């Protein structure tokens, strides 16, 4: 390509339009730095490797601390995060459904035995 010729002369208009759209949508340098695609330029290049190593070390320390202090299974059961069950994991959903069904049946029986308003009035419980 000669230095005197324009790119418009060598490429179709649709290719140039497509390229222009992509350039408009291109992320800024700050966005690329935030996503760790580019290194931040506010630190001298000689210190960038040390800064990355320090950040990674801090992240590892924070993760290790969180793992050391995570709640035990018993604590999660106490806070109703996990269910206390001895059933195999594949059967836990069926166990929950069975328990819910049992509770529903028990509630139905209690509602059937519940005294009516007339009975409560006769027994002088309500007026």
Image: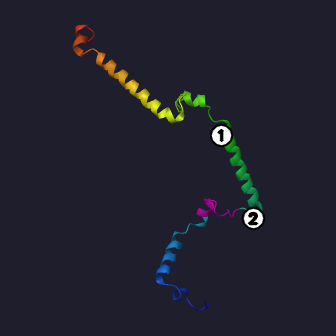
Residue 81, position in %: x, y? 53, 33
Question: Closer to the camera, 107 or 14?
Answer: 107
* Crowding at mark 1 (Cα within 10 Å: few <14, some 14-19, many 20+): few
On the question of residue 127 being in view, the answer is: no
Residue at horizontal 46 percent and vertical 80 percent from the top:
14
Residue 119, position in %: x, y? 24, 11
Residue at horizontal 55 percent and vertical 86 percent from the top:
7
Residue picked out by circle 1: 66
**Stretch of the chain drawn in magenta:** 31-42
- Image-quadrant location for residue 63: top right
Residue 45 shown in magenta: no
Residue picked out by circle 2: 45
- Image-quadrant location for residue 111: top left
Residue 35 shown in magenta: yes
Residue 95, position in %: x, y? 47, 30
Numbered disc 2: secondary structure:
helix
**Alpha carbon distance from label 2 to label 1:** 32 Å
> What colour scheme does the image use?
rainbow
Q: Quadrant of the N terminus?
A: bottom right
Q: Quadrant of the C terminus?
A: top left
Return the residue found at the far top.
Answer: 123
| Looking at the image, residue 45 lies above or below residue 125 | below
Q: Earlier in the sequence, mark 2 or mark 1?
A: 2
């Amino acid at each position: 390509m000669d230095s005197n010729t324009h790119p418009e002369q060598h490429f179709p208009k649709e290719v140039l339009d497509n390229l222009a759209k992509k350039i408009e949508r291109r992320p800024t340098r700050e966005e690329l730095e935030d996503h760790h695609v580019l290194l931040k330029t506010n630190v001298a290049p000689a210190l960038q490797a040390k800064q990355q190593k320090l950040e990674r070390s801090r992240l590892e320390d924070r993760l290790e601390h969180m793992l050391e202090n995570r709640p035990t299974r018993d604590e999660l059961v106490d806070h109703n995060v996990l269910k206390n069950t001895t059933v195999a994991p594949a059967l836990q959903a069926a166990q929950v459904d069975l328990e819910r069904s049992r509770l529903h049946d028990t509630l139905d029986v209690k509602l059937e035995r519940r005294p009516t308003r007339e009975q409560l009035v006769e027994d002088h419980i309500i007026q």
